[in-house]
Image (cartoon, rainbow, N blue to C red):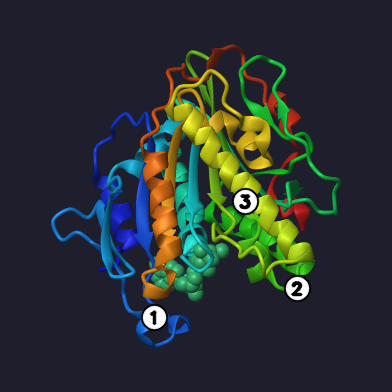
Amino acid sequence: QVRNFPLLLQEALKNARAEVGNIRVIGRVRPITKEDGDGPEANNAVTFDSDDDAVIHLLHKGKPVSFELDKVFQEVQDLITSCIDGYNVCIFAYGQTGAGKTYTMEGTVENPGINQRALQLLFSEVQEKASDWEYAITVSVAEIYNEALRDLLAKEPQEKLEIKLCPDGSGQLYVPGLTEFRVQSVDDINKVFEFGHTNRTTEYTNLNEHSSRSHALVIITVRGTDYSTGLRTTGKLNLVDLAGSERVGKSGAEGNRLREAQYINKSLSALGDVISALRSRQGHVPFRNSKLTYLLQDSLSGDSKTLMLVQVSPVEKNTSETLCSLKFAERVRSVELGPGSRRTELMSWSSQEHLETGSVQTPSSTR
Ligand code: ADP
Ligand code: MG
């Protein structure tokens, strides 16, 4: 039984809004593919409960293990609405290489993924509010590889980017020099993603291999102004396709591969540590232990909303990694984020002000 994501997303659209304060975790099992082979190792080992599809059953080394996650309904649409309302949101895909993270985030031409759908949902919600609010939606595309943050929309190769805390005391983070494209149509979205993709493809001979070892980020910023009151809101939507979570054998890896594995371990365990600290309500949350958690700090803390998509492979030969991923999911799921306030400000809106975070351009101006 494989979850049909587009259908669930449509379902999500239809459902009423709910306040989402916690980190939500949804499991997604990719279908069995040709690459899984046809031996017993390719047997299906993962199923959803027939009564409750938030419950996943895994058959690991002959023993059944079950995990309860959150249901997908309400989640995605709520998060998009929150972002328009001025909250920071983070949706990330976690799992071993080959478990379907990129498929879920990027999708295909026929079946677009979350990145594309999120922007489409944003456009349609913003349109509905167009009589009272003016919105500007911008997109940045970046990757973190070996703890270096790189702008994938830059026209020319750039120095490593730094992450900075906004000096205004808002607790928001920004990346000086990170390109932001203003998007207004599906056509613009396609151009932006295509541009980022081309940038990545030209740099790496084996993009598949590279992308399993780097975190890919799409950062969408929604800046709104209420025409009548001048109330301003800024919401950020971070869409993250994480590096593969598989454990690399101590003996096998050397040189570059070992270095990459150490960096991935470092950032994924930093993510786990941040989540543990948030869960136990520790005063100090170690956001700065990795670029990933530092960049996502303002989307993981306070009144931010986080959705984690835990991708798992359905087949028997992957059950050890599947078990690890589901355990991580379970650990993440019990986190409650602290109270905070919506990031709104009553002041006159100047379109120049937000240019500080990067150069806002329309995709066409890059061609
Ligand atoms: P990851 O990014 O986690 O390494 P991919 O997204 O590249 O994994 O998925 C691995 C393979 O499985 C790809 O060939 C992809 O097309 C296929 N796949 C993953 N999820 C699905 C799905 N929901 N439906 C159909 N094919 C999928
Ligand atoms: Mg991938």
Reading the image, the residue beneath label 1 is 41
Which numbered disc, 3 or 2, marks the residue closer to the eye? 3
Amino acid, disc 1: Glu
**In the rendered image, which quarter is residue 359 located in?**
top right
Give the answer, above or below, for where 155 lies relative to 224.
below
Element marked by disc 1? helix
Residue 44, percent across and down? Answer: 31, 75
Amino acid, disc 2: Thr
Q: Is mark 3 within 8 Å of ligand 1?
A: no
Q: Residue at position x 69%, y 47% from top?
A: 362
**In the rendered image, which quarter is residue 50 located in?**
bottom left
Reading the image, the residue beneath label 2 is 205
Q: Residue at position x 37%, y 28% from top?
A: 21
Please tell me which residue lies in front, 111 or 167: 167
Quadrant (top left, top right, bottom left, bottom right) of the C terminus? bottom right
Which numbered disc, 1 or 2, marks the residue closer to the eye? 1
Q: Which dot marks residue 265? A: 3
Is tag 3's residue or tag 1's residue first in the polypeptide sequence?
A: 1
Amino acid, disc 3: Asn
Is tag 3's residue or tag 2's residue first in the polypeptide sequence?
A: 2
Q: Is residue 193 left or right of residue 315?
A: right
Q: Which dot marks residue 315? A: none
Element marked by disc 3? helix
